[in-house]
Image (cartoon, rainbow, N blue to C red):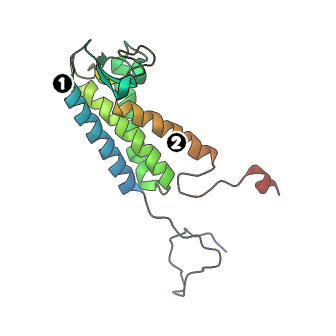
Amino acid sequence: MTDQPEDAEPQDGGPPDTGTAVPVRPRKIGLLAVIAVTVVVLDVISKIVVVATVQPNEPVRLLGGLVYLSLIRNPGAAFSMATGMTWLLALIAIGVVVFIIRMAPRLRSTPWAVSLGLVLGGAIGNLIDRIFRAPGFLQGHVVDFVSVFGPNAEYFPVFNVADSAITIGGISLVITALLGIDFDGTRTKPRKAQGA
């Protein structure tokens, strides 16, 4: 008996073998795309509003001081890390975007789709800044504006919507992998079960 793809038609024209066949899960490209586009739109709009309304070194206090809007132009990575490597960070972001887009057609897991959608949207959001903002192409400084517990990154690095999406998506990817959920929606059997 030869193995056939899960979605292959039976060769004899008879009904499919429902005893052992595993149903093919629907692709999750649409879910990934919707999440990514939502993150990009929220990130771009929030940055436009903050740049237009918040002045540098004049933070806006919100929620009784729990959150401040502090406008900072960040040449580094998320949470102001790796400053001075703007062009390299831009190239890494491009690589991440290309990788996720190329993998998307094989995506059949909802947790993976949500996680990768967040990472993709965040990467694109910050990449837009690096391409279109001053001082120039692939050198643009990212607009960060959320400062928690104090103004101007007093207690925690300033971040933006894209940074938040990348962080949440990355944590979600780790949890998904630890739970044994594969890219195609199947679950990896525990090692004990495999050895039994």
Report, in whole angstroms, how far the alpha carbon at label 2 lies from the one at label 1. Answer: 33 Å
Going from the N terminus, do you reach mark 2 or mark 1 first? 1
Query: Which residue appears farthest toward the left when viewing the image?
Result: 52
Q: Is residue 21 above or below residue 39?
A: below
Judged left or right of residue 41, residue 105 is right
Image quadrant of residue 76?
Answer: top left
Amino acid type, mark 1: Thr
| Residue at 54% from the left image edge and 80% from the top image edge | 10
| Residue at 77% from the left image edge and 56% from the top image edge | 193
Image quadrant of residue 146?
Answer: top left
Local crowd size for mark 2, using a 10 Å CA cut-off: few (<14), some (14–19), many (≥20):
some
Image quadrant of residue 66?
Answer: top left
Q: Nearer the viewer, residue 158 or 115?
A: 158
| Residue at 36% from the left image edge and 25% from the top image edge | 64
Q: Nearer the viewer, residue 125 or 13?
A: 125
| Residue at 30% from the left image edge and 34% from the top image edge | 125
Q: Is residue 54 visible?
A: yes
Amino acid type, mark 2: Ser
Mark 1 sits on what residue? 53
Q: Residue 173 in the image: x percent, y percent?
A: 53, 42
Secondary structure beneath dot 2 equals: helix
**What label does residue 172 carry, if any?**
2
Q: Quadrant of the N terminus?
A: bottom right
Q: Residue 144 in the image: x percent, y percent?
A: 32, 23
Query: Which residue appears farthest toward the right when viewing the image?
Result: 196
Judged left or right of residue 175, residue 99 is left
How many marks do you count on the picture? 2
Q: Is residue 6 above or below residue 87?
A: below
Q: Is residue 121 above or below residue 7?
A: above
Q: Residue 32 in the image: x percent, y percent?
A: 39, 50
Q: Nearer the viewer, residue 76 or 59?
A: 59
Q: Nearer the viewer, residue 143 or 106?
A: 143
